Amino acid sequence: MDSDEEIHDVYDGDSAEDYYYSGGDSNMDGGDSIGGGEDEDDDAGYGYGYASDEGSEKTYTVLREDDIRQRQEESISHVSAVLSISRVAASILLCHYKWNVSQLHDQWFADEDRIRKSVGLLTKPVAMFSNANEMNCGICFDSYPRDQIQSAVCGHPYCITCWKGYITTSINDGPGCLLLRCPAPGCGAAVGHDMIHKLASDEDREKYSRYFVRSYIVDKKKTKWCPAPDCENAVEFELGSNVYDVKCLCSHAFCWNCTEEAHRPVDCSTVAKWILKNSAESENMNWILANSKPCPKCKRPIEKNQGCMHMSCTPPCKFEFCWLCLGAWSDHGERTGGFYACNRYEAAKQEGLYDESEKRREMAKNSLERYTHYYERWASNQTLEKLSDKLKEPESQLKFIIEAWQQIIECRRVLKWTYAYGYYLPEHETAKRQLFEYSQGEAEAALERLHQCAEKELLVFLGNDDGEVETQPDFETFRPKLAGLTRVTRSYFENLVRALENGLSEVDSQAASSTSVSSKNAGAKGKGGKAKSSSSRSSRTGTRNIDDVNHWNCERCTYANPESSTLCQMCRNPR
Amino acid sequence: MANSNLPRRIIKETQRLLSEPAPGISASPSEENMRYFNVMVLGPSQSPYEGGVFKLELFLPEEYPMAPPKLGRICLDILKDKWSPALQIRTVLLSIQALLSAPNPDDPLSENVAKHWKSNEVEAVETAKEWTRLYATGA
């Protein structure tokens, strides 16, 4: 499976095809590339999004709200200096020009008068100022002393109350308030941000300022908001890159191209298809879950829409059971409370038995969310602190545990998407199907080992809250083991992702040798890889025996290496 | 009822509409609700609507003048996104009168009438005259 050299990325097939396999080239000089080498504990910890070890090039930058504000400030200062205009005028112009500084410069210097007119930057008042002490407001028609009247540059007089009403209406109408103009018909003079800040209520000022920040991103092709709920960050993408997976600082990983959850190795159109398909079907599934219970014998879902608790499944099953406790009806009757109650159920419910099984069912349905949840809980419980205390190790030395968990989460996500991939893999591509299921199984097995180690074996070190833990030596073997498994699992998934993004082209080039692979996985496993049975997995966790003559199995990670190599190609363990 | 807290602006506008009406336009508030106006617009001379009297109902919402008056289903930009609180009932009604002088078949209420207007203006003008005579005169 050593096919790195042969890989031609077919992901979306456009420009800059292979820069990230060749470790960076012309597209990526400058910018913020992260040094490669043995940068194993790169904070992003986002292994397979980039080239493996020889050079992790970041193809994007996460912008926090502060970063955006700072960039806005810089643009405003720049424009204000270059065009010799006030900062207020500069920010009006930038809002009109969608923060495109160079386009603004070009057009301004080509025809300043036209630009001024179109955005409403007047140089002098157009309305006649009377010298009277009182002025009439053009909205409420009342007369006010001069100090209660305000105007934009144009000089059209409105009282402070009406200005406030005008501004608040505009802000509540949406981001159009950034381009607010004088209310006078046909005037068009821009209302500066300074005036709005002076006159708006605190709440409106807050909204206005939010629109202002958002205006920086909304119109940009290079930058998008992180789609995670409540996340205020944006991601700026290096155009030309074809690795769309990005990870926000909020830890949400998404596809920059379609803004769905990160879905390598599956392409965006497949994801869209898959989501559409599932949204239709999940409606059904939700309904079934909410309104039915499976027959305890034949497992067909049964909806109970009326009547007593004595259920009879339809032929041929005909099983008679109690709707509440799902036990056989033969155990029921007068002594359990009659036809409309079940005191066995009531008793069991009191003990909390049913709640728990209900919960388990729910959890199983949300496997990925579950792992994320576990991780978050794990992290928030200050497990690390506790561990650090017990082992007298600084927390920084325990980072490998976090990395292991991050790897688990990412792998679960990839694994999830491989099922969508499998679903759309044509049935007749038998060889590809077999290779797919094999690679998927291998990756999954590695992930299970890692997960086992990160979850179960870690518990030992947490021990009970009281009592000393005599684990110093053990922990020193645990560390390299978990770190090793993390690395190995990452490699497996990188390979899996590459193979799938390649359209499993190895099958074509290695048609001959693939027969040996397929012999192991012989027997179709049902549609779309969905029925990957647990038995096939357990056979993998044992020693591998593909083509024993030409391979040796790594002691540490069980990877099957070609005879010619002396180091394991997965984990670099010597033979 | 709603008349007790009528903003001064509405009172002033009403007074001016009554004391110095715009030519060809009359607008008078309903007795029960001072935010509700019965409006009559005369068809402009030299238009197919000449001689017709067009009745409208105009309502000033609670937010007026920050929000535009409500005026049936008339496609007019100042009744929507181009509204400004510095506009008035009078200016809105003048705009409607102007619309009768120069219909805008690119932004129609009725697609069929607009098509007819664009494909055969002479015939469409005749229809407009006919309908004005039938539905907007006398009574």
Image: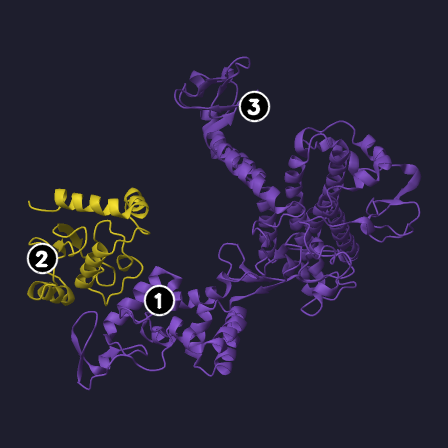
Chain colours: A purple, B yellow
Task: Identify the mark at residue B28; answer none if there is no mark.
Answer: 2
Task: Write down the chain letter for disc 3.
Answer: A
Q: Residue at left 65%, top 38%?
A: A419
Disc 2 to disc 3: CB gap under 8 Å: no
Residue nearer the viewer, A448 or A207:
A207
* Left or right, A83 with reference to A9: left
Disc 3 to disc 1: CB gap under 8 Å: no
Residue projecting furthest to the front? B122
Helix, strand or loop at disc 2? Answer: strand
Task: Write down the chain letter for disc 1.
Answer: A
Where's residue A552, x and y in %? 90, 43
Where's residue B37, x and y in %? 12, 55
Task: Write down the chain letter for disc 2.
Answer: B
Quadrant assignment for the N terminus of chain A: top right
Residue tagged by mark 3?
A299
> Distance of mark 2 from mark 3, alpha carbons?
74 Å
Where's residue A285, x and y in %? 51, 33
Q: Amino acid at mark 3?
A: Lys
Q: Does the image show residue A530?
A: no
**Image-quadrant location for residue A530:** top right
**Image-quadrant location for residue A21:** bottom right
* Marks 2 and 3 belong to one chain: no
Q: Residue at left 62%, top 56%?
A: A246
Residue tagged by mark 1?
A204
Which of disc 1 and disc 3 is earlier in sequence? Answer: 1
Helix, strand or loop at disc 3? Answer: loop
Q: Residues within 10 Å of mark 3 (few under 14, many from 20)?
A: few
